[in-house]
Image: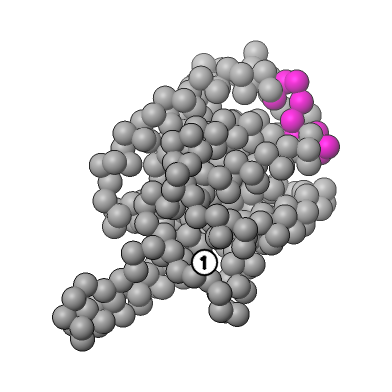
Amino acid sequence: MDMMTLWHLTAWEFAALAFAALLVGFSKTAVSGANTVSLALFAAVLPARASTGVLLPLLIVGDVLAVLTYRRHAHWPTLWRLFPAVAAGVVVGTLFLMRADDEAVGTSIGAILLLMAGVTVWRRRAADRAARATADAEGGPGGRSGPEEVTSRAGRIKARSYGVLGGFTTMVANAGGPVMSLYLLSAGFRKLGFLGTSAFFFLIVNTSKVPFSVGLGLIDAQSLLLDAALVLFVVPGALLGKWAVDRINQRVFEQLVIAATVVGGVQLLVR
């Protein structure tokens, strides 16, 4: 694999990767989608394709920590709806990686993330207006307390669309976090349900990507050696995230998730 080894990194380059690893842990236990910043940092220091192979094992470590923290809050019906479409997206992403260059991949994913963030903001404002109208009409609080049941034809289409896109983006650039974040927000998940469901989702999906990444030459002995040095920073990031999430209210949590998606999308467009 064409990449710099641990021994070829400057102190500043290693510091940037260490900070990115810290953000991986933080994103897994606090603000999902923030690891798009990590993706951009890795791609800035390492060759773009190689950076995805180095980042994947760190994401899996973060996923394990998130599952241990939020395992009681996962919503499995949502996960079972998503997995078939995600598997299809991973296969498409693997085929795409075999042919597309880094610039085309980053630009397309960045544009998709920004578009989806805009749609999500619009949907949330529309839902807030509807909730206020319901509260005014009924004389009580409106809004949803948990995830919506996606049983309608439109709901199934939405789940499949997000699933395929999530599988594609996670395989191509480890950028599936913002896609799934937007889907879970649009489905009405509260904070802990959001984190528990996304933790199991990404542990399963990222683990399933390992054989594909090895086959593409993205993971090898050199990348794993760099991972061994960086994994030490994932754990404190996860602990910091667990401390922070208890101090973030639901509204701020949703705003941070959307903001992280926008930042990640812009970085993918301009890198």
Q: Residue furthest bottom?
A: 137
Residue at point 58%, 48% (across, down): 201
Residue 140 against residue 85 in the figure, above or below: below
Residue 252 against residue 122 in the figure, above or below: above
Queried whether the magenta region covers residue 220, the answer comes back as yes
Left/right of residue 220 with respect to residue 59 in the rendered view:
right
Element carrying mark 1: helix
Q: Mark 1 — residue?
A: 115
Q: Residue furthest top?
A: 7
Residue at point 29%, 41% (across, down): 246
Left/right of residue 81 with respect to residue 259 in the rendered view:
right
Residue at point 69%, 61% (across, down): 85
Residue 42: name its quadrant: top right
Q: Position of residue 251 (x, y in %)?
A: 29, 57
Residue 208: name its quadrant: top right
Q: Position of residue 247 (x, y in %)?
A: 25, 42
Left/right of residue 254 with respect to residue 84 in the rendered view:
left
Residue 180 against residue 244 in the figure, above or below: below
Q: Nearer the viewer, residue 5 or 75?
A: 75
Q: Residue furthest left?
A: 139
Q: Position of residue 249 (x, y in %)?
A: 26, 51
Residue 192 against residue 118 in the figure, above or below: above
Residue 200 appears in the rendering: yes
Queried whether the magenta region covers residue 103, the answer comes back as no
Left/right of residue 79 with respect to residue 24 in the rendered view:
right
Q: Which residues are magenta?
A: 215-223
Q: Nearer the viewer, residue 220 or 191?
A: 191
Give the residue type at disc 1.
Answer: Leu
Colour convention: one colour
